[in-house]
Amino acid sequence: MKPESNPIRDLLAFLTNPIWPTAVFWVVLLAGLGIAFSGWQRHPAQRTPHTAGIAVLRLIMGTMWWQQSLWKIPPNYDGLLFWMKQMVAHSSVHVQATMVDRIVAPNIVVFGPLVYLTEALIGVSLMLGVFTRLFAALGFLMALNLWVGLYSAPNEWPWTYGYLIVIQALFVIDPPGRRLGLEKPVPPAVQQTQPSGPDPQAELISASAARWHEAGHGPRDRDRSPAAHRLIAADPPAHYVGGSVTGTAGPRAREKPS
C-alpha cells in the first residue's frame, strides 16, 4: 500500500530527489541564504522582523516556482499538454482557447521550453532576491493566464490562481529583493527623535549671547551661566541673530565686537 501523502513527506522527497535539478536548487537556495545573512550583517537597518519575514516569504515563493517547474523539464511535455487541453476546453476567454489550440499546443517544442525556463528563472530570481520586480511581473502574467484559462475547469478552485496573482502583484509593487536580497536595500526611514542630552545649539547660542553681553550690552560676568563660561573658554564663537546661529566668528571678531 502506497503511504499517504503529507506535507513533511512531500517536502523531504523534493529536497532529496536524486536528479540534477535538486542539486541546482540546493546551490541556489544556499546562495540565497548566504546573501540574506550577508545583508543582515552589512545593513543594520534591515535587522527587523518585517524584513526577515519578507525575505522568508520570498524564499518560499521562489521554492514554489522552482518546484512547479520540475514536471515541465524538456522534453517532458505530457503534463503541460494536458493542462493546455484543459484551457482549450474550459477557458473563460474564447481568444485564449483559440490561441492555445491553434498556436501554442501544436508548437509545444518551442513554447514548452519557454514555459519551463520562465518558471525556473522566476524561482531563481526570488530565492536570490535579484530582478524581483521583473520576474514577479512575469509570474503575475503566468498566474493570470492560468486563472483565465482554468477558471471553469472541473475540480479547480479559481481563487487558487487568484491568490497567486495577488502575491505576485504585491512583489511587483514592493520588490522583495530589496530586503536581504541582491537588490539595493530599502532606505531606512528617517527617525525624528527628541535629543535626550543637552542641546549643543542652545549652548552655542547662550555663549554667543554671553559675548554680546561681554561687550557691555548685557549682565556682568558673574551673571553668566556655567555653560556660557565653558563654551567661551573653549572658543566656539557664533553670530546670534534673530534667535538663531547664523555663522561663526574668529578671534578678531572677539577682540572687536560690533
Image (cartoon, grey):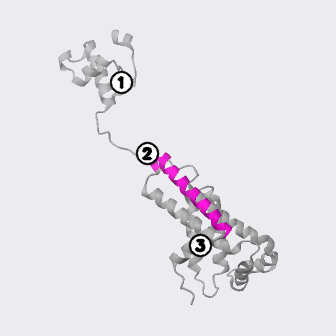
- Residue 229 position (above or below residue 189): above
Residue 87 is situated, as x and y percent measured from the top left of the image, at 70, 81
Secondary structure under tag 3 reads: helix
Q: Nearer the viewer, residue 193 or 55?
A: 55
Residue at 50 percent of width and 53 percent of height = 37
The residue under label 1 is 241
The residue under label 2 is 190
Residue 151 is situated, as x and y percent measured from the top left of the image, at 63, 81
The residue under label 3 is 14
| Distance between the alpha carbons at the discs numbered 1 and 3 | 73 Å
| Distance between the alpha carbons at the discs numbered 1 and 2 | 29 Å
Which circle marks residue 192 in the picture?
none
Q: Is residue 26 left or right of residue 97?
A: left
Amino acid type at image mark 2: Val
- Residue 244 position (above or below residue 58): above
Q: Is residue 154 left or right of residue 41?
A: right
Residue at 50 percent of width and 60 percent of height = 54
Residue 114 is situated, as x and y percent measured from the top left of the image, at 74, 68
| Distance between the alpha carbons at the discs numbered 3 and 2 | 44 Å
Secondary structure under tag 1 reads: strand
Residue at the left extreme of this rendering: 222
Instruction: Please tell me how crowded label 3 is: few (under 14), some (14-19), or many (20+) other residues with Cα within 10 Å.
Output: few
Q: Quadrant of the C terminus?
A: top left
The answer to whether marks 3 and 2 mark residues whose Cβ atoms lie closer than 8 Å is no
Residue range (magenta): 19-45
Return the disc, 1 or 3, that comes first in the chain's sequence.
3
Mark 1 or 3, which is nearer the eye?
Answer: 3
